[in-house]
Amino acid sequence: MSLLDNTQLALEAAMNGSMLRQTLLTGDLVNANTPGFQPRDVNFQQTLSQALSQGQSPQTVSFTPYTQRQTNGPNGNGVDTELTNAEIAENSLLYDDLTKVAAARESILEAAMNASQVP
């Protein structure tokens, strides 16, 4: 039996998906001048949402990166650096929010456990 409820497990899964997305986006940015490079991304929010709506445990959800086929430069590179920078910033804010919610939930649990230890 897990001490964590489905909401906490879903938060952790979302944080893992956000970390994967950040890794992919920064990799795209690093390769912005690599001829023929195609950007990769992951839609972890949709994947997690679908899994939860189907009754799947958040612990079993896996996030699969995909390649975005596009060309933004004469060398066949598909990275739009301005868009990628904006996506990195947005994903960073989302991850920050997820960690704050998870921390708040953990604080509530800790307070509840300490309240049961009446002197």
Image (tube, rainbow, N blue to C red):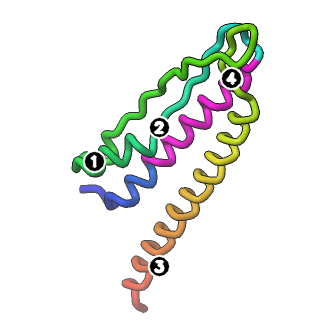
Residue 53 horizontal side relative to residue 72, left or right: left
Q: Secondary structure at mark 2?
A: loop
Residue sitting at 23 percent across and 47 percent down?
54
Ranked by sequence position, the earlier of labels 4 and 3 is 4
Find out whether residue 30 is within the magenta segment: yes
Measured in 3D between alpha carbons, the distance from the residue under mark 1 to the one under mark 4, in whole angstroms, is 34 Å
Residue at image mark 2: 43
Amino acid found under the numbered disc labelled 4: Val
Mark 2 vs mark 4: give the one in front.
4
**Magenta residues, start to end:** 13-32
- The residue sitting at 60% across, 18% down in the picture is 70
Crowdedness near tag 3: few (<14), some (14–19) or many (≥20) residues, C-alpha within 10 Å: few
Residue designated by label 3? 111
Q: Assign the N terminus to one quadrant of the image.
A: bottom left
State left or right for residue 109 relative to residue 22: left
The tally of labels here is 4
Kindly identify which residue carries mark 1: 57
Q: Which mark sits nearer the N-terminus, 2 or 4? A: 2
Q: Which mark is first along the chain, 4 or 1?
A: 1
On the image, the x and y values in percent for residue 95 come to 59, 51
Residue 3 percent across, percent down from the top left? 32, 61
> What residue is shown with label 4?
79
> CA gap, disc 1 to disc 3?
26 Å
